[in-house]
Image (cartoon, coloured by chain):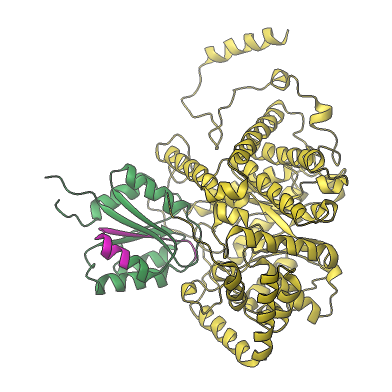
Chain colours: A yellow, B green
Amino acid sequence: MGNRTKTAWAEKYEAGGVRDADFTSISGRPLEPLYTWEDLAGSDPETRLGWPGEYPYTRGVHPSMYRGKLWTMRQFAGMGTPDQTNERYRFLLEKGQTGLSVAFDNPTLYGRDSDHALAAGEVGKTGVAVDTLADMERLFAGIPLDRVSTSMTINAPAAWIFAMFLANAEKRGIGFDKLRGTLQNDILKEYIAQKEWIFPPEPHLRLITDLMAFCAEKVPQWNTISISGYHIREAGSTAAQELAFTLADGFCYVEHALAAGLDIEDFAPRLSFFFNSHLDFFEEIAKMRAARRIWARAMRDKYKAKNPRSWLCRFHVQTAGCSLTAQQPEINIVRTALEALAGVLGGCQSLHTNSMDEALALPSEKAVEIALRTQQIIAFESGAANVIDPLGGSYYIEKLTNDLEEEAERYFRKIDELGGVVKAIEQGFFQREITRAAYEYEMALSRRKKFHVGVNEFANLGQKLEIPLLEIDESTERDQVAALLRTKAERDNGAVRESLAALKTAAAAGRNLMPPLLECARRYATLGEISDALTAVFGSYREQPFF
Amino acid sequence: MADRKIKVIIAKPGLDGHDRGAKVVARALVEAGMEVVYLGLQQTPESIVRAAVEEDADVIGLSILSGAHMTNFRRVRELMLSSGLGDRLLTGGGIIPTKDQEKLQEMGVGKVFGPGDDLQEIVEYIRANARRVPG
């Protein structure tokens, strides 16, 4: 019966004529004009979907989802000096934001001090500069760290930035057990996509397991890692690559922690994820639903976790920075709104919406406010938060979810064949896959098979930019370097040397590095001094350039 | 005799890992028949110009999404002039506000590109403005 109906329709569809257009997804996925129950044949809703808050969590990690608690509205922010960023945080909290998210500048992300030669011109430009505990104190001055959760986008030097964060809490008399937040701390995707590393992979992986072990005991509410697909996607991957590479990284962290002797039920509930939400609305929603299902199954069946909390793929979503255009920047508000809605329909736990001006500069206060208001419109006006997984059961969404899951499984097999994630990185596998996808997409735009409104279609030629941009004054770098030199002059340099020597000894001896890192932070050792001390033991890493 | 291939150095100065644009452009230039030397990440103005001298490059392209464009373009341009590469094209791309693009042009930097700019346009710009050496 079904077949006859679809055939009859298909004849009419063909007869009606079809536009001369590219009907693939943004990832280049071929799409049918219509999906029906036939596409879900053999896919049992009871086992494939289950119920919200129940295995396999396709429909969401909580039984009540946004009826119980809305997602956390968390805008990633940081610029200039710690004082300037502190001012932005107070502004965002006053406007109704519910969590903080720290953007560090490039030198900090690479574990370098603001006066390092390679940092010239970069201090405070794409985030806030943090060199010592003194900067951490200024960054969070007056912010109740026991009540506001804090996410920090930091990877290579995550353990010592976190040590500074803990030392600051300690000075303010806030117990570690009261601290809530997330460290990105995902080094694998650095080698794959974002390229901010210090050491070779193995010592970085050891630091991550040290941090997991330390937090399980002392900072129990902290998410020790945010396994990130965001940057993989921004580097140009497809949706399926983002899904597969991110979850493969997650499996690699689990395997390292298990090999280090950690109990899966101690660390797995503190693992969290971070996905991109790009322009292809349905594909993004399906990707997020597939992620929950794949992760739950692997954690339960492959890694034998017993506690359902260890099965949950909880994630943050950020709208796609790479989808924004410098041309007609105001229309980026619309792109971001669609991407944010996909994040919500995909069941995210927290969300960042990009600002309209981010293809040009760090966002202005006005642009950030509009971005936050976009989330508030979705939450309070659109009705999207009223019903759990509202697209569940859509033939198209369920088929895409199944397809993305299968594609991810194919990638997992390929990565296993290459000898695992670290080996695949060393062979440049992920990097090549992503570079190829990025080039193909760029060519599709250039050949006008894909469109970017305002850029290769509906462009306003000769239009002058009419929005005000945030500028980071050149004096920022001078002020930050002066503050660093002042801290170095005022601290007890003998104590710093001792703490750094103790850190090196612990690194060489294979002991957990969090206690000595905390001691270095308390003594106001600089980020760069700690990086150098550890590099002396662990060595450094260089990527063979290719394109 | 045909002209030799246009030779382009592409580099990422400083601490900036955003290499998507640099790699996509490098590939497009090769497809368009140019020779590309991609130096990769964490380059200094000195290492970039040294490579340009050694390679006798016609074009230097910098990719900068870290906000350090003024510092790096200025320094690379100075070193090009002092190394006898004043006739070579210095161009690039990244997140670079229009106002800064104008300032860069005043210091002798060519056009700089940003998100959304067409690959073909970049290829044609380089072809039209690269120093050409008869082969």
Q: Please determine whether, in this image, residue A158 is positioned above or below residue A167.
A: above
The part of the chain drawn in magenta is B50-66
The residue positioned farthest toward the left in the image shown? B1
User: Residue A543, position in %: x, y?
Assistant: 48, 57
Quadrant position of residue A157? bottom right
Tell which of A255 and B122 is nearer to you: A255
The N terminus of chain B - image quarter: top left
Task: Look at 55% across and 56% down and name the residue there.
Answer: A194
Q: Please determine whether, in this image, residue A37 is positioned above or below residue B63.
A: above
Q: Please determine whether, in this image, residue A317 is positioned above or below residue A302.
A: below
Tell which of A68 and A547 is nearer to you: A547
User: Residue A256, position in %: x, y?
Assistant: 71, 53
* Residue A324 highlighted magenta (yes or no): no
Task: Look at 66% across and 45% down and name the residue there.
Answer: A248
User: Residue B121, position in %: x, y?
Assistant: 34, 47
Residue A185 visible at all: no
User: Residue A120, position in %: x, y?
Assistant: 46, 75
* Residue B54 highlighted magenta (yes or no): yes
Quadrant position of residue A208? bottom right
Residue A75 visible at all: yes
Along the horizontal axis of the image, is A163 left or right of A424?
Answer: right
The residue positioned farthest toward the front in the image shown? A509
Quadrant position of residue A206? bottom right
Task: Look at 51% across and 54% down and name the residue there.
Answer: A329
Along the horizontal axis of the image, is A515 left or right of A84?
Answer: right
Along the horizontal axis of the image, is A1 left or right of A221?
Answer: left
